[in-house]
Structure formats: C-alpha cells, structure tokens
Image: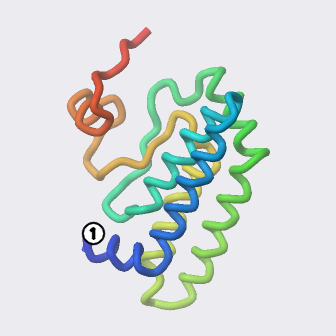
Amino acid sequence: MTLAGNIIWLVCGGLFSGIAHIVAGFLLCLTVIGIPFGFQEIKIGIATLAPFGCELVEYEDANSALRLVLNVIWLVGFGWVIALHHLLWAVLLALTVVGLPFALQHLKLIPLALLPFGRDLVRSGWEAGDARNYESHWGRPVPAQR
C-alpha cells in the first residue's frame, strides 16, 4: 500500500508540489539569512514527495531556544500558508472515500509545515536519535550530544 499510495500521490500532484517546495527552498538559500529556512523548505519538499509510510518525529532538542525563535519566524512568514494549503487539500480530499488516505497524508504534513525546525518526516519504525538510521539517512555520523 505504501508504494502504491506514493505512486498515486506523485501522479496526482505530489511531484509538482514537492518540486515547488524544493525550488522555493533553493531560492531561499540565495540569501544568507534565508539558508536555514531554505533547508527546512527543501526538507518539506522531500517529505511531500513520498509521505506514505512515514511518520513525524520530534528530536530531543526540538524546543531549544534557537529553534523556537526560528520556528516562530517560520510560522509568521511561511508556515501558516503551507499549513493552510495542506488543510484545504485535506478537507477537499476527505469529501470522497477514495481521497481519505490522501487527506490523512496532508494532515500528517501540517505539523511539519507549521514548525519544521527540530522535526522530520522519516520512514516508519525510525526513532528520533537512532544513530544507525540517522547515518543511513543523512550520510554522516550523529552529532555529539551536549
């Protein structure tokens, strides 16, 4: 179901939406101030490409002072628009029985769209802070804990 759901998702607009998020992320990265926000936008774009079989995880330091400030700036600047977009599509897709699984995926993406710093959408079964999965996902060792 996960593979079939992701294929249908991509064909029915997920590919366009994911690419749009990634392009917007690269545009944000053109400015020095926009780099952290661009990385989060690219992360949302990658998550939007294949949301079936993924779950939202919150890292241990997700609510640190710096991430809290960045999340507030994100929420005021971009996050509410992206979250409203996902909510609109979730409501429209929930009107049909066939659209219910896709509506649930849009609802899953709302928290990531609102507060992306310190949160990530990862394949189901991963634990936040799992070193083995972190290294295979990001290609580098886990950062040292303070």
Total numbered circles: 1
Up/down of 107 relative to 137, above or below: below
Query: Residue 67 at x, y = what percent?
Result: 62, 28
Quarter-of-image position of residue 26: top right
Identify which residue, 66 or 49, lies in the foreground. 49
Q: In this rendering, would 65 be left or right of 15?
A: right
Q: Secondary structure at mark 1?
A: helix
Amino acid residing under circle 1? Thr
Q: Which residue is labeled 1 in the image?
A: 2
Quarter-of-image position of residue 74: top right
Taking the spot 52% from the left edge, 51% from the top edge, the residue there is 44
Query: Residue 123 at x, y = what percent?
Result: 30, 51
Taking the spot 61% from the left edge, 43% from the top edge, the residue there is 115
Query: Residue 55 at x, y = what percent?
Result: 38, 53
Q: Residues within 10 Å of mark 1 (few under 14, many from 20)?
A: few
Taking the spot 59% from the left edge, 22% from the top edge, the residue there is 64
